[in-house]
Structure formats: C-alpha cells, structure tokens
Image (tube, helix red, strand yellow):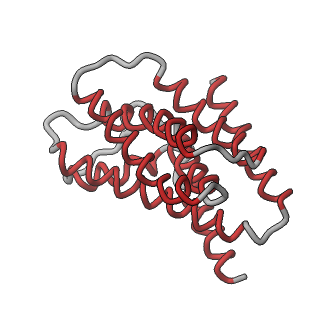
Amino acid sequence: MKKMTKLLMTAGLMLTATVASAHPGHGLHTHSDFLSGLLHPFMGIDHLLAMAAIGFWSIRQNTAMKNGAPLFVVGGMVLGAALAWGGLNLAGVETGIAMSVLLAGVLIATMAKLPTAVGGVLVALFMITHGYAHGAEMTAGASLLSYGAGFLIATLAITFAGRGLGALMLKADNRVTRSLGGVVAVIGGVLAAG
C-alpha cells in the first residue's frame, strides 16, 4: 500500500507541476539545453497525461506491446522532433496532442487490448505530435543532441511512472482503472475543444 501511495503522490505532483497551456514555449528559459529539454515534457498537462496514460495502458497489453511501448514512444518522439527540426510544417499538432490524450484515456477506460502492430503504430503516431511540439519549441541555437536527450529521458521517466501505476492497478478493482481512463479522456476532450 505504501508503494501505491508513493506512486499516486508522484503522479499527482507531476500532474500539478503546471496547469499551464502547453504551447508555445512555456516561458521556460534555462542556461542548459539538456535541462531545457528535460523540463519541457513536465510543463504541460497534455504531455504528462499522454505519456503516463500510454505507459499505464501498455501494462495490460500482450508481452510484445508491453515491452515495446517505450520504444514506440521514443521512436515517435524522435520522428516528430526530426520533422520539426527539418523545417516541415505539420498542421494540427495541438489537435493531435489533445486527441492523443483523449484516445489514450479511451484505451484505458475500455481496457482495450490491441495487436502489437496496431498498438505500436497508434502510440508512435500519438508521439509524433508531441515530438514535433518539443522539437519546434527548442530555443534557437540550442544543441539538438543535448535538448533531445533531455526530453527523451523525461519522456521515458513519465512513461515508466505510468507503467508503474498501471502495474499497481492490476490488483485494483477494474472500475477504478476505467474511471481513471475516463478522467484522462475527458481532459483530452477539454483540451481538444479549447
């Protein structure tokens, strides 16, 4: 029970780190490209919820999807950031980010189990929009390597925190899990409408 309490407190602190709108820029200015990248995913509830929810959802998937989810998350983030750094204008990024939160919540609420190919593509597509936002908001002149390493480490930390909570919730009443998914989906809907 102590582990559950600590994990829920950690998740709560992550979610309350900011209620600011996630884009653009966050007003975050550090003297370290790595630190700037590391902090960026924590500066918007949309990023926190999407990454944590994907981690949470992945725990109930087949072994390949469960083990592959962090790779799909990182792969999508890297691809999205590369698109931004390459100068591609990706339309509808904010809507895509909000929809990733909504759909991740729906996946949790319905306890959907997807084949690895479908789940992996869906997760990577979700993360492309997040990676694009992170890449587009990098400070001019910042080191791609340092900034990218920072936001990828933060992304994995958030995803694994979600996985930890998901693993603890395997023993809980499914109604609690479904309710959590419903809350995430509603927040995603509000973000999409805003």
Q: Which residue is at the front of the view, 66 or 104? A: 66
Residue 134 falls in image quadrant = top left
Determine the residue positioned at 37% across, 43% down: 75
In the image, taking residue 65 as reference, residue 102 lies left or right, namely right
**Rendering coords of residue 5 (x, y %):** 68, 75
Residue nearest the viewer, comparing 50 with 55: 55
Q: Quadrant of residue 144?
A: top left
**Which residue is at the front of the view, 116 or 103?**
116
Answer above or below: position of 174 versus 36. below
90 relative to 192 in the view: left or right: left
Q: Residue at x 41, y 51 (%)?
A: 71
- Nearest the eye: 173 or 93: 173
Q: Residue at x 58, y 68 (%)?
A: 164
Quarter of the image where the N terminus is located: bottom right
Image position, residue 23 (x, y; %): 44, 32
Q: Is 84 displayed left or right of 129 in the figure?
A: left
- In the rendered image, the residue lying farthest to the bottom is 2
Task: From the top left corner, tell me how far across and down residue 96 is, in percent.
Answer: 53, 27
Above or below 178: residue 190: above
Name the residue: 61% across, 44% down. Answer: 115
Q: Quadrant of the C terminus?
A: top right
- Percent x, y of residue 129: 44, 31
Q: How many marks?
A: 0
